[in-house]
Image (cartoon, rainbow, N blue to C red):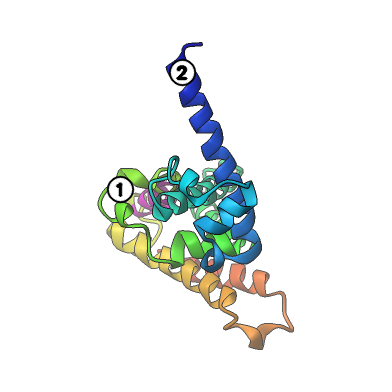
Amino acid sequence: MGTLERKEREKLEMRKTILKAATELFLKDGIEKLTLRAIATKIEYSVGTIYLYYKDKDELFHDLMEKGYQKLSKEIQKIPATNDHIAYLKQLARTYIHFGLKNPQYYDLMFIMEKPDQLSQDLSELGAGLKTFNALYDTIRTVVEKDLIRFKDVPTASMAIWGVEHGLVSLFNRNRLLMYTDQNVEEQLFTSMDNFIDSIKT
């Protein structure tokens, strides 16, 4: 292995070390308390060293978001294939909701917080995030084209369905559903989403 290849491998390994420490701190304390100084302290390096591998905190947050999208994408891939497109859409929505409830820190970073500046300029930067969106978008395209729901255009349908499931997760994660604590809230959210999809069927 040449010198350049070795240096590139070492750089990738160091980025993995930094990202691993950042992930542990992020999941423990939340994104608000995640600082480059805290990461540097955890890995016993100087803050300046981190800047050799990440140009700024936004770039590091982008990699954290990518990890979250990869986790969600893996869950989506577990959904069994079926010719019942409405049933698949419901299961897709349930998977999204379940992910949001079980991974509130990631969910905030992925869908609540303002995105790093570079993400607003180029959709290709979304990586696995675009893949998870396409899973929903393509499913909705299928049900629209087959006239299975009352929406006639895919963008509007996808915004509506995504908006409902996002709203449900956000309400729960922000403790706005405390009046339902005597029930299985996750099942209530699943049922609410199922009923919404049923309400827009043709």
Query: Is 158 or 53 nearer to us in this picture?
Result: 53
Q: Is residue 18 magenta?
A: no
Residue occupying the point 58% across, 75% down? 172
Q: Which residue is mark 1?
A: 123
Query: Is 142 or 96 nearer to us in this picture?
Result: 96
In the image, 28: left or right of 118? right
Q: Secondary structure at mark 1?
A: helix
For label 2, the crowd category at 10 Å Cα-Cα, with few meaning under 14, some 14 to 19 and many 20 or more, is: few
Q: Is residue 141 visible?
A: yes
Indicate the position of residue 137 as horizontal and vertical percent values. Answer: 38, 51
Question: Looking at the image, which residue sits at the far top?
Answer: 1
Part of the protein shown in magenta: 132-144
Q: Is residue 79 visible?
A: no
Asked if labels 1 and 2 touch by Cβ distance under 8 angstroms, the answer is no
Residue occupying the point 53% across, 51% down? 68
Question: Looking at the image, which residue sits at the far right?
Answer: 182
Residue occupying the point 49% across, 44% down? 49
Q: Is residue 137 magenta?
A: yes
Q: Single out the mark in the foreground, 2 or 1.
A: 2
Classify the position of the C terminus by image quarter.
bottom left
Tell me the amino acid under the disc marked 1. Leu
